[in-house]
Amino acid sequence: MELFLQQLINGVTLGSIYGLIAIGYTMVFGIIGMVNFAHGDVFMLSTFIALIVFLALTQLFGVTSLAFTFVVVLVFAMAFTALWNWLIERLAYRRLRGSFRLAPLISAIGMSIFLSNLVYVVQGPRNKSIPPQFSEVIKVTQGGTYYVTLAYKQILIVAVTAILLVAFWFLVQKTSLGRAQRACEQDAKMAALLGVDVDRTISLTFVIGAALAAVAGVLYMINYGVVNSADGFIPGVKAFTAAVLGGIGSLPGAVIGGLLIGLIEVFWANYFSSDYKDVAAFSILAVTLIFMPSGLFGRPEVEKV
């Protein structure tokens, strides 16, 4: 029972990170129908931005306050990652928006390769690490030979994910930007005729998705303490899997899909074989899509005639 509880905590923590990345996928796909395969590498880029800012604050400027360092790292990572994604959308995607459907997809794959190789050349192939942060733990269960622990960093990750989910649900449902996003999702041409600045709305969607990926990147760095230039592809694919599993276009679905992927991965690795944890996660996705093509919370697409 103790092992089950511990893996449940670990799975929710990992799934929260996947969920934050998945929100970026589901927002972009919901508006322009494009799978931004560079999003995973934008997440990877944010981990290196966070690493550089963290090392500059702690080693160059001698900052010792952990809370202050975390806030500054988070702000810088969100700002610079959002700027990168805005440039990517402006240079690589906007001109292809009216082209054939495969053109933006090919451009996204090319941008993914460019970002991963750029970080590889600049930072090198080796792992970059930081000292353990928020490593204090709370003993959930006492007695016996095995203690169930809950680390402060795990509480931080789950809390930040829950707060951001509520905040961005409110943004999409209750603000003028959210109404513009939903209008573009339903019919971009009609939205433009009604006065919605479609280009601005799409750019802001990319910026928001990148900011959330940056938050996930900072939390990923804190949780594992190690970043690598190859960290973009696998987390990106799993986050996309989470978005599809939860239902493309649904913010709660993206996070719930991320939690499910995280739980499946952790439980499979501990109770069966860690070599096939990725296979298990993708197999669950395949089974779900066979019986529920729209995902768990997605709406069936209605074709306009």
Image (cartoon, grey):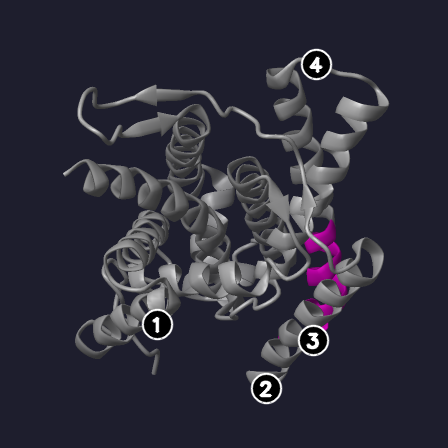
Mark 2 neighbour density, 10 Å: few (under 14) some (14–19) many (20 or more): few
Q: Which residues are magenta?
A: 84-97
Q: Marks 3 and 1: in contact by CB < 8 Å?
A: no
Of the numbered discs 4 and 1, the one sitting upstream in the chain is 4
Q: Which residue is mark 2?
A: 100
Residue 78 percent coordinates (x, y): 65, 39
Determine which of the numbered discs, if any, sits on residue 64 in the image: 4
- In this view, the residue farthest toward the front is 145
Q: Marks 1 and 4: in contact by CB < 8 Å?
A: no
Q: Residue at x 75, y 56 (%)?
A: 87
Query: Three-letter amino acid code at disc 2?
Result: Phe
Q: Residue at x 28, y 76 (%)?
A: 286
Query: Three-letter amino acid code at disc 1?
Result: Val
- The kind of secondary structure element at disc 1 is helix
Q: Which residue is mark 3?
A: 110
Of the numbered discs 1 and 2, the one sitting upstream in the chain is 2
- Mark-to-mark CA distance, 1 and 2: 32 Å
Query: Three-letter amino acid code at disc 4?
Result: Thr
Residue 75 percent coordinates (x, y): 66, 30
Query: Three-letter amino acid code at disc 3?
Result: Gly
Q: How many marks?
A: 4
Seen in the image, is 54 located left or right of residue 279? right
Q: Residue at x 72, y 73 (%)?
A: 95
- Mark-to-mark CA distance, 4 and 3: 40 Å
Residue 87 on the magenta segment: yes
For the stretch drawn in magenta, the main secondary structure is helix
Q: Quadrant of residue 57?
A: top right
- Mark-to-mark CA distance, 4 and 2: 53 Å
Q: Which residue is mark 1?
A: 279
Seen in the image, is 11 located left or right of residue 76? left
